[in-house]
Amino acid sequence: MVDYDVVIVGAGPAGASAAYWLGEAGKRVLVLDKERLPRYKPCGGGMSRSVLERFPFDLSPVVEREIGRVCFRFRDGREVEAGLSGQRPIVMVMRDRFDYLILQHARADVRDGEQVVSLRQDEASVELETRAGETFRARTLIGADGANSRVARLAGLRRDKQMGMAIEVEVPADDGLLEKYSDTALFIFGTPPFGYLWIFPKAEHLSVGVGAFEGRGTEVKDVLRQEMAKLGVEIDGAPQYGHPLPIYLRHEPLHRGRVVLVGDAAGLMDPLLGEGVRHAVDSGRIAAEAILAGDLSGYTRRVQREIGGDFLWALRWARAFYEHPWGCFELGVRNPRFVKEFVRLLAGQTTYRRMAALAPFNLLLGMGRRLPAE
């Protein structure tokens, strides 16, 4: 039996961030992960530059590309481009390097290849057992083990969760394709139903994928192959990685007793875009602050207030956009004022709620200045 102040299950951005802030406060922290680290993580890897600025150490070594343009494409081939002014606010990373660099700065014991199989808790502590038969005890347990969180199941949390799915491919690209997308993030809307596709540039390849909040895997794979072929991106023969997308549908408890959930384990994924890294990092810090304050009961309330509340607005946007993709492309994507707000959203500079408040004005003022769809 080994005692810690906090045990964190999962070494992704949420778990690594919590470990960092707790370690800085002098807590004895253990991080367990079922994979050998660093591990490949299926993810587009696009994020706001502001995520890098949340830490007092340099994360620039893991930045593979800086984005200067965003391109929005509809399923019929029409495209709208928008340039990003000032310092490029969107960056691309590979998740294995990004997650691991945060973890390397954490003052924590790390045990990889350790899968949790059971937990017991009482008023004073939580006790974990791993598949290898080791037992660990802590005052608090943080579940940061992804959308299919075993910690959540064992703790009786997130029982009615709903999942979408994503398929991601790292595609070798010739010099021509790399040059074409060198500083451009491409989003394809209108297909599949209730989803979108993307092309994100990395240092030596393209990260392409599809996210769908409804639909079957074979259908989504066919859409990905067909749409990428139209753009000259060949994905046949490249490994395809699938992963679940936890959909935030409602406020629900994210703690129980001495167990708290963060990141994808807590369902903290943007319901419109599927973005999760920024919210994972923020929830990791909120969890650390709640533990340091001795206020676990306040953790759920603060996450709902600072993250979940805006997700409910994102859900409204998602329903409108995915149920009426043609109309939203014409009235929204081709509207320069909406595009400007959307780019600010990607950069973490505005919220869905603020976008909703400004929507009537942006709709009217932008109608006469629609962007060309080539």
Image (spheres, helix red, strand yellow):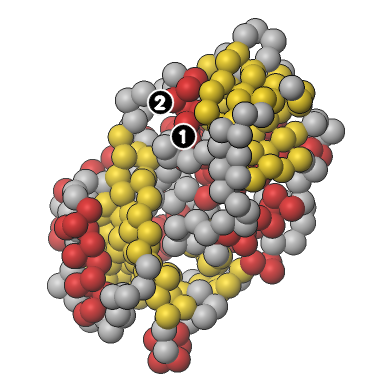
**Circles 1 and 2: CB atoms closer than 8 Å:** yes
- What is the quadrant of the N terminus in the image? top right
Quadrant of the rendered structure where residue 195 is? bottom left
How many marks are shown on the rendered structure?
A: 2
Q: What label does residue 240 carry, if any?
A: none
Say if 31 sits above or below 96 in the image: above
Neighbor class of circle 2 (other Cα within 10 Å; few <14, some 14-19, many 20+) is many
Q: Amino acid at mark 2?
A: Arg
Q: Amino acid at mark 1?
A: Ser
Residue 204 or 295: which is nearer the viewer?
A: 204
Say if 14 sits above or below 334 in the image: above
Horizontal side of 63 relative to 42 (left or right) equals right
- Residue lying furthest front in this view? 133
Residue 143 or 198: which is nearer the viewer?
A: 143
**How far across and how far down the image is residue 188, in percent?**
28, 67
> What residue do we see at 50% from left, 74% from top?
202
> What residue do we see at 27% from left, 52% from top?
212
Q: Which residue is mark 2?
A: 158
Q: Does the image show residue 280?
A: yes
> What residue do we see at 76% from left, 25% from top?
2
Helix, strand or loop at label 1? It is: loop
> What residue do we see at 23% from left, 71% from top?
225
Q: Which of pointers 1 and 2 lies earlier in the amino acid sequence?
A: 1
Q: Which residue is mark 1?
A: 149
